[in-house]
Amino acid sequence: MITGKNYIGSKLSAKGSKTYHTFNPQLNKENETAHVEASSEEIEEAAQLATEAFETYKTVSGEKKAEFLNAIADEILALDDTLIKTYCSETGLPEGRAHGERGRTVGQLRSFADLVEEGSWVEASIDTAQPDRKPLPKSDIRKYAVPLGPVVVFGASNFPLAFSTAGGDTAAALASGCPVIVKSHPMHAGTGELVSSAIVKAAEKTGMPNGVFSNLNSSGNDVGAALVKHPKVKAVGFTGSIKGGRALYDLAAQRDEPIPVFAEMGSINPVVILPDALKNKGKDLANTYAGSITLGTGQFCTNPGLILGIKGEELSGFVSQLSEDILAIEPSCMLHPNISETYTKNKEKAISQSETQVVADYDKEVKANHAQQAVLTVDGDKFLNNPTLHHEVFGPFSIVVQCDDKEQLEDVISNLEGQLTGTLIADSDEASEYSGVISALQNRVGRIIYNGVPTGVEVCPSMVHGGPYPSSTDSRFTAVGIHSIKRWVRPFSYQDWPNELLPDELKNENPLGISRLVNNSQTKAAIE
Ligand code: NAP
């Protein structure tokens, strides 16, 4: 049952006076439950509990943490239809998407469980002592990764499960040994509470310390800002707008003790279509891209918001076909009236730029909160000089930039802000002639795709979901896949520490059997 209350550790709590409701965009009406925003006292309690929990949780074995993560996955599945129905009622997304996202969430939790159970992720590194070294003896030094402390996770509006309460950030932080306080996303607070109940149950069943997880409601900036500024919070994970992510990043930097904010923010994901590809498969590409631009009503951070090509008959043909194909697609529902209004406003702003031409703008009447897809074109030199056109329009929208030549194409790419992805569409031997374009693209993105679409982020160890600012606040890390755990840890060294006082990961006998770098050789062997 959804109560509308906060979880302060394992306890349901509603001390605040401000309430709000989630919204069903398909039915265009508010959902029933009144969610109670967390009070200052509850924020304090959650931070205090998380700090206390950290002292125990940071020492919990990989095996026990794996049990916890797997139990969360099991409890989420046990929520069954209640979760799916609540998800749909708060997002307007179809059941198929809810099932898919739940599968992804559960898969992420289990992959972190496997990672910490195996244990080598801590990157243990051991340099044994050389007491006889001349002119000075060498100390015994041993390093591994330790958790940072309580982490605040901001749920994403567009991924209520996979990037929210028990999503990638939470799973990675819990796997690393950090307690998590979730700042629940106001648009899907009911889904967030259900998933929180699953985490709390799993924590109790597997004997985790109270406060390892809390879930705080809010429908404004205050709770999130207070959490980021709280001295007991040691890191932040965020998915959402550049404006929101940057505000939180700045708040964290202004603290007496600045802390890392790993924010995954906006991206327009440039797609470069080379001339031969346009000539030989332009029609198919138009159809594929009409689908990719409108997938999930364009509400993906990897939505292709920018398509780049070299002017000519082939590019014009592609644009006409794309317009025709995209207008044939039935408009779909956005997550929330606010997102839908913002989409329309940003789309109109782009259209109102005198340099753009509208080649598709769905103009038939649509149901409430449904987005009317659009495609614009602009010339390369005009695009270069108009920063408004470089901004994300979150929704089923894309701009085709028509460049004069290869040099201008390269120039446009080099002048883009940092992006999550870049895509190159090329015919068989074409790419080698465009090494400058490829190199420029590589400088601006975290992942480069060949002859595909940027939408669809596979969860696997080699995935990079992140990129140069502003697509993320720290391009050295990924927000997807097991290596995202690295955001929540710091390296820590022991010098000349007695073997019996070392953590198991660093003991001579290697009781966990993990892979370690011992005197510059990677090995699972014990140290004699
Ligand atoms: P958002 O406005 O960035 O908000 C995300 C979360 O951060 C919310 O929980 C919000 O809390 C909190 N927040 C934002 N600004 C804050 C501040 N200054 N101080 C404290 N907390 C703050 O994103 P959204 O609500 O998910 O969607 C709004 C827009 O973000 C969309 O229209 C879209 O443009 C963009 N977006 C982009 C992506 C992407 O992947 N590129 C994904 C999602 C959204 P409150 O809501 O409680 O204020």
Image: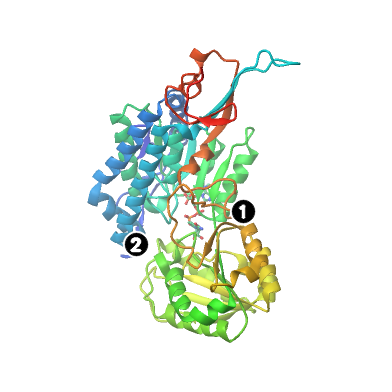
Q: Quadrant of residue 271?
A: bottom right
Q: Amino acid at mark 2?
A: Gly
The residue closer to the viewer here, 279 or 415, is: 279
The residue closer to the viewer here, 225 or 86, is: 86
Q: Amino acid at mark 1?
A: Pro
Instruction: Report the side of 244 relative to 157 (left or right).
Output: right
Above-or-below relation of 425 to 278: above
Q: Which residue is mark 1?
A: 468
Q: Secondary structure at mark 1?
A: loop
Q: Which residue is mark 2?
A: 92
Q: Position of residue 491 (x, y in %)?
A: 58, 31
Whole-number angstrom distance, CA of label 1 to CA of label 2: 32 Å
Q: Quadrant of residue 312?
A: bottom right
Above-or-below relation of 235 to 342: above
Q: Quadrant of the N terminus?
A: top left
Q: Position of residue 196 (x, y in %)?
A: 34, 41
Mark 1 Cα-neighbour bin, 10 Å: few <14, some 14–19, many ≥20:
some
Q: Position of residue 156 (x, y in %)?
A: 45, 51
Query: Which is more N-terminal, label 2 or label 1?
Result: 2
Outermost residue to the right: 135
Instruction: Report the side of 133 relative to 485 (left or right).
Output: right
Above-or-below relation of 211 to 428: above
**Residue at 59% across / 20% down in the picture?**
128
**Residue at 66% across / 13% down in the picture?**
131
Above-or-below relation of 165 to 275: above
Mark 2 Cα-neighbour bin, 10 Å: few <14, some 14–19, many ≥20:
many
Residue 343 appears in view: yes
Q: Secondary structure at mark 2?
A: loop
Q: Position of residue 108 (x, y in %)?
A: 39, 45
Residue 387 appears in view: no
